[in-house]
Image: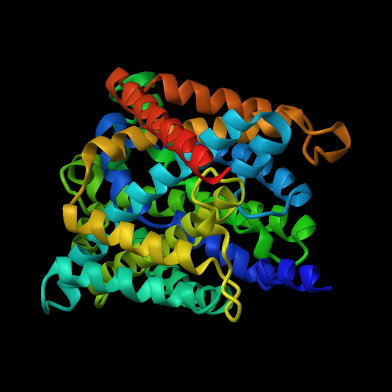
Amino acid sequence: MEQTNKKKQQELLRVLTLKDAVGVGLGAIIGAGVFVVTGVAAGVAGPAFLMGLLFAGAVAAFNGLSSAQLAAVYPHSGGTYEYGYRLLNPTLGFSAGWMFLISKLSAAGVVAIGFGSYFYQLVPVLSPLALSLAAVVLLTVANYFGIKKAGVLNLVIVSFTLLSLLYLVFSGIPEIDPRNYRPFAPFGVSGIAEASALLFFAFTGYARIATLAEEVKEPQTTIPRAVIITIVSAIVLYAAVSVVAVGVIGTEQMADSKSPLQVVADALHTPAVRTIVTLGASTAMLGVLLSQILGISRMMLAMGRRNDLPPVFERVHERFRVPHLGIVVTGILILLLTLAGSFEFIVRAASFTILLYYSITNMAALRQPRQEQLYGRLIPVLGLVGCLAMSVSLPLLVILSGIGLLLVGFVLRLLFHKVYE
């Protein structure tokens, strides 16, 4: 009996509903992608980046469905880390977990900095850096006091972001100039392919739902529904925002700005549109940051259970039933990255590591018994081909950097196993 109670104390609470899971997914996706990366993609493909957006969304959908069918059968913290161990081998399992940590930690630092720069435009107090640090501390505290409270806060944040983007879309539709869509593909197929690779990272937050599977109610049905709703909603929203942005200011102006949607807002005449878009950008960064802390701490929990990280990370708070040490360490690491500024080397390498992460997801889905495959074998095959195609299209230095970070992880893993086993 005592052992059973102890085991229950180490378990997370299943309290996230379909609404909460969709909110987590949208909070993770709708961030820097739509507010920043659309401008970069417009620069490499012209108006045809809209085609790249659809291709990236399709690959993300294939990956998302693979994640969903895996999470439905293995509803545990860790996502692809867990599937890799169970269906492939420990090497691929650890690779997935380590690559997730590297990519999400580096992204979290960048997003925190982005929040400070946006929010400072609305509330010019202290400094952008101080605002960034305050956001990290507040969201870390919010995560510490329970997944349900963090989920409610996330829904509030996501609602502000969605409303701001919808306001921009409906404000921009009457001011679209069809001439801005010509020439449609000035850089040909290669430009569209590069835009696809860039925009794929704007969709990758859907995996957060699978990473939190241990805290989702009725995961067998809730997770697949949440993933599908999240990806379809994100594709439709991104497409609407992008079509309006191109139609209002053209791709050259989008490419010349680090905040293209603010340039679009400046060109519109509806009341307070720039303020609302800037507020939406701020809340979008908060939503991504909140979901990063959620996902990273749960990955630390899963890896601590297998001594791939120090086992202290598997501890669950007796009252709040969250991996509290993982949350605190995640917050500290993000604070340090935010103080240090953007590590371009790590951020660029992370683009390769996250593609490998999703490749392992699809490989695991292919290894599932036929009766467990909700969507057949074609979906993970398409997801795997899409991920591998985009990964080899990255610059060689980025690929080598990603492999180097992975090797560092294996060295640390060897040390942890020697110490704790």
Total numbered circles = 0
Look at the image and tell me in which quarter the N terminus lies.
bottom right
Residue sitting nearer the eye, 168 or 55: 55
User: Residue 164 is drawn in which quadrant?
Assistant: bottom left
Residue sitting nearer the eye, 210 or 188: 210
Q: Is residue 234 above or below residue 287?
A: above
Q: Is residue 188 above or below residue 223?
A: above
The colouring scheme, among rainbow, by chain, secondary structure or one colour, is rainbow
> At 68% across and 29% down in the image, what residue appears?
88
Q: For this view, does 27 lie left or right of residue 209? A: left
Residue 302 horizontal/vertical position (percent): 59, 52
Residue 255 horizontal/vertical position (percent): 21, 41
Q: For this view, does 28 lie left or right of residue 85? A: left
Look at the image and tell me in which quarter the C terminus lies.
top right
Q: For this view, does 44 lie left or right of residue 325? A: left
> At 29% across and 38% down in the image, what residue appears?
346
Question: Can residue 192 be spotted in the picture?
Answer: no
Question: Can residue 108 be spotted in the picture?
Answer: yes
User: Residue 273 is drawn in which quadrant?
Assistant: bottom left
Residue 69 horizontal/vertical position (percent): 74, 44
Q: Is residue 186 above or below residue 283?
A: above
Residue sitting nearer the eye, 91 or 57: 91
> At 31% across and 27% down in the image, what residue appears?
401
User: Residue 151 is drawn in which quadrant?
Assistant: bottom right
Residue 175 horizontal/vertical position (percent): 29, 58
> At 31% across and 58% down in the image, what residue appears?
334
